[in-house]
Amino acid sequence: MFFYLSKKIAIPNNVKLKCISWNKDQGFIACGGEDGLLKVLKLETQTDDAKLRGLAAPSNLSMNQTLEGHSGSVQVVTWNEQYQKLTTSDQNGLIIVWMLYKGSWYEEMINNRNKSVVRSMSWNADGQKICIVYEDGAVIVGSVDGNRIWGKDLKGIQLCHVAWSADSKVLLFGMANGEIHIYDNQGNFIMKMKLNCLVNVTGAISIAGIHWYHGTEGYVEPDCPCLAICFDNGRCQIMRHENDQNPVLIDTGMYVVSIQWNHTGSVLAVAGSQKAVTQDKDVNTVQFYTPFGEHLGTLKVPGKHMSALSWEGGGLKIALAVDSFIYFANIRPDYKWGYCSNTVVYAYTRPDRPEYCVVFWDTKNNEKYVKYVKSLISITTCGDFCILATKADENHPQFVLVLCNSIGTPLDPKYIDIVPLFVAMTKTHVIAASKEAFYTWQYRVAKKLTALEINQITRSRKEGRERIFHVDDTPSGSVDGVLDYSKAIQGRESGTIQRYSLPNVGLIQKYSLNCRAYQLSLNCNSSRLAIIDISGVLTFFDLDARVTDSTGQQVIGELLKLERKDVWDMKWAKDNPDLFAMMEKTRMYVFRNLDPEEPIQTSGYICNFEDLEIKSVLLDEILKNPEHPNKDYIINFEIRSLRDSRALIEKVGIEDASQFIEDNPHPRLWRLLAEAALQKLDLHTAEQAFVRCKDYQGIKFVKRLGNLQSESMKQAEVAAYFGRFEEAERMYLDMDRRDLAIGLRLKLGDWFRVLQLLKTGSGDADDSLLEQAHNAIGDYFADRQKWLNAVQYYVQGRNQERLAECYYMLEDYEGLENLANSLPEHHKLLPEIAQMFVRVGMCEQAVTAFLKCNQPKAAVDTCVHLNQWNKAVELAKNHSMKEIGSLLARYASHLLEKNKTLDAIELYRKANYFYDAAKLMFKIADEEAKKRTKPLRVKKLYVLSALLIEQYHEQMKNAQRGKVKGKGSEATSALAGLLEEEVLSTASRFTDNAWRGAEAYHFFILAQRQLYEGYVDTALKTALHLRDYEDIIPAVEIYSLLALCACASRAFGTCSKAFIKLESLETLSSEQKQQYEDLALEIFTKHTPKDNRKSELDNLLEGGEGKLPTCVATGSPITEYQFWMCSVCKHCVLAQEISNYSFCPLCHSSVG
């Protein structure tokens, strides 16, 4: 950061100044002095020249009004910026509030306690309240409209300072004895402030200033110190808040009179005087510090006694009240900024965000890219890249160097353990230096480098890409590193400079300087080093000169004679080791071989110096409104040789200019000559000049011009070459060469104009070109997300692919469907459109599109994906697809998960997967049986299961029949089918005897029906069959029914056996068994347990191999040879019985 005095205003009659305050918003400066002096001044820049902006523009007093009203010396002046009011008070205790009316200041309110004197006044952050403190301890808080809010007398205390907190909840009162008390905004005492900076201080001290930055422009970093308190002995502390136990401590080493923060809270100015070592008198100085106590620099001010200071609203100027003068100093801040490939990178803070806002502003296209970066330390740029140095996070002492491209995309972050106080970069290396070490990183980006640079990269690859070095064994501060391709320079606080070679980092040479360097800069061939020291003195050091020093020894390196003061920026030319530009106060000088050209008035920072042109950026102006940078803030200056050559060409002629350029050769001058010769169609000179500036394209262009016959054609080509496209197009059209005009616009990619030219032509427009133009315009709109406009052009350009994309983006699915319908079959776009439908869940349209391009599998997958299983199965069947099995399994498991078992069975049955359907059906039947539901329902379920198994058998036989067609008889094929089925179904009980469950429940129901109808004998016979089905119906049910039937038909022997069985059942509880025993006792005491009609039952009871078939209608065994057998379930009915039935009693299939 640099500062220099720029202006001095004298107060009439040598009246001494006491106080000064600069209004941050409107720019008024109020100064108060002895004998009631109160003036309001305003500095304004009056200039019409666009290049003269900011500090470089001349400033004059646009207002200079003396305010009458005070009689004693004015001691306090303070602005209320929000309400445009000025509050002043004098030694007699008179307070006046002034207001601006029609360009002049008038008294608005007056107040006098006639007792004591006002020591300090402070408005709060929003300008609503003022706090006034008197020397005798009186405190008054009033509102902006003049009403008193509260007052208080602090007994026995002398007050001298007051400050509000940012949220207006806390007041700090500074006492005459140096103590600071903390009060709330109602005037209640909270506590005394701990003053760490006064440890070990003896003697009387007083407070020089308290300033609390209110965060109106954001903070430098989160939790940044913002409350500065300074004492007259030079001790200072900067706190994060009023209770901060660990403040930043500074000893300024001077007698302090006044302190103030700048507008962003990033610089604290401390004004006062210092004892000069050589002279007896004190020297007025202003010291500048960061919120963290780092010293930024010192400004020495002439005069006897400095009484006050005040910052300008933009932080670029500072006003100092010294004796009867106001001095103005310009501040050149250390902006965090850089310049890479036409892009200005700058950082600023915003009140609404804790991070730094880093803007990458592409000055060529006027586009900006914004990144938010936490704890940014610095920005360094080179070539097309930039390095952002940041803190990793609050708790770790690690730092990050992020390599970014010119639109702010992070390419490569590197974590390092040293503080990157100074960072420099070349096309291949980044070097970061802390106080005692430096780190080198050879970064790689996919970029074409020259052979020399590639050679360097390969050489150092073996040694690794990142290394860290200590400056020497004893720590001493390295101050700055600025590098180029082949040399690294490290400067140190002691004034030693160390020179290293890159990329192998070998220490080549040490030099000693007699100043403390602030900024170092090497020229393009590393022969000279420019040094700006901390007080803004620029000197030059020749690194390679060999000179003999005072002791007669030969040393390398000498300090050159040139020395300039108040320099705050400098840049070497990239293409000439003797050219450089520097900024001195508000003037830019260009030096060639250490001789200056005439200065240019500007206050810009130099971005780039090459091709005899200096690009400078007015950062001060940009940062006034950082969100909207203006192209006017980038200024190009041409240096004298370029201006002279241009003047010669224009005024004297090409020959003389050519001679002048021959004497002062530079590629840029040759190009200038070539372009001038082209304008005049002097092809010979143009070609020679292009050869001299090695412009191969230029040479080819001149050759092509030589081959053209017509003069007007040549002129048109030259106009196009210089980018005067409208003119070239007009010439082509005048020559009736519409084709060339279209060709020109095609090259430029100006499709709107191409379309216009194609439409206006009288001739037949080329259809393919028209289509191309429509599509290109469609692309233009699509790139900018203007899909509706794009659709119109794509329709005309018949570009179905992009049309589909636009419809999709517009969510115009109807349009998309129509497009799909209009496409021919097997069109390559159909699958894409289908996918678009899939993404938005439009199954039907997607299937249609997939089928149209003959992708049934994709269609089925879509249905599955969108849970349209019925459709999926239907499609799979229609297109007889192999994987229907797995598909069904997936769907069925999907249904079973949702407990939709019956739907799953239906699915399998429809798809002819009878076996799987039967398995599920049996499962349901078993579950229902366990639940003891109605037996009829359970029977029906078992019948359905058995029917499914029968269908499965049938299917197997048919399949086998199909396989063995023509091989032997039907019988063998049926047998083969059964055998195969046998292999399949050994594991499951239900395929062999599918009807068992149905039979069990059939007889169970039949026996009960017969019993209730009174056919007790037949009921007993039926019930006896149930003994074979204990695995299906619980034994308790079976034997209870059997005992009942037997008892009813007086077959007590059977009844007895049933009771024995019941009593021995494991499943019954002892109580139930007891009940059965009691019942048995009751029956069998009356009747002997013997069957009366034994003969009939004998054959039933024997069983065994010769078991007779049972009639499913009556439950009796069939002994005759004539009986009816059901074609479906293969069960029999007595011949005489079947006439009563039209359906099979078991499976309910019709009796055919």
Image (spheres, helix red, strand yellow):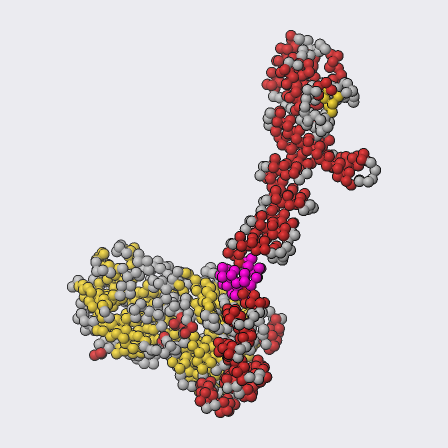
Which quarter of the figure is the N terminus placed in? bottom left
Magenta-highlighted stretch: main secondary structure? helix
Residue at the image point whose x is 62% and y is 71% from the top: 462
Left or right: 112 as drawn, with respect to 391: left
* Residue extending farthest left: 114
* Residue extending farthest right: 968
Count the labels in the image.
Answer: 0
Residue at the image point whose x is 53% and y is 70% from the top: 758
| Of residues 24 and 725, the one drawn nearer to the viewer in this rendering | 725
Which quarter of the figure is the C terminus placed in? top right
Left or right: 567 as drawn, with respect to 801: left
Q: Position of residue 312 (x, y in %)?
A: 32, 71
Q: Which region is colored magenta?
A: 776-805
Residue at the image point whose x is 78% and y is 35% from the top: 974
Residue at the image point whose x is 56% and y is 88% from the top: 684
Q: On screen, 372 above or below 460? A: above
Left or right: 403 as drawn, with respect to 1089: left
Q: Is residue 282 visible?
A: no
Q: Position of residue 948 (x, y in %)?
A: 68, 33
Q: Say which quarter of the image contains residue 1134.
A: top right
| Of residues 349 and 773, the one drawn nearer to the viewer in this rendering | 773
Q: Position of residue 313 (x, y in %)?
A: 33, 69
703 within the magenta span: no
Q: Say which quarter of the image contains residue 650.
A: bottom left
| Of residues 829 and 1088, the one drawn nearer to the viewer in this rendering | 829
796 within the magenta span: yes
Q: On screen, 635 above or below 193? A: below
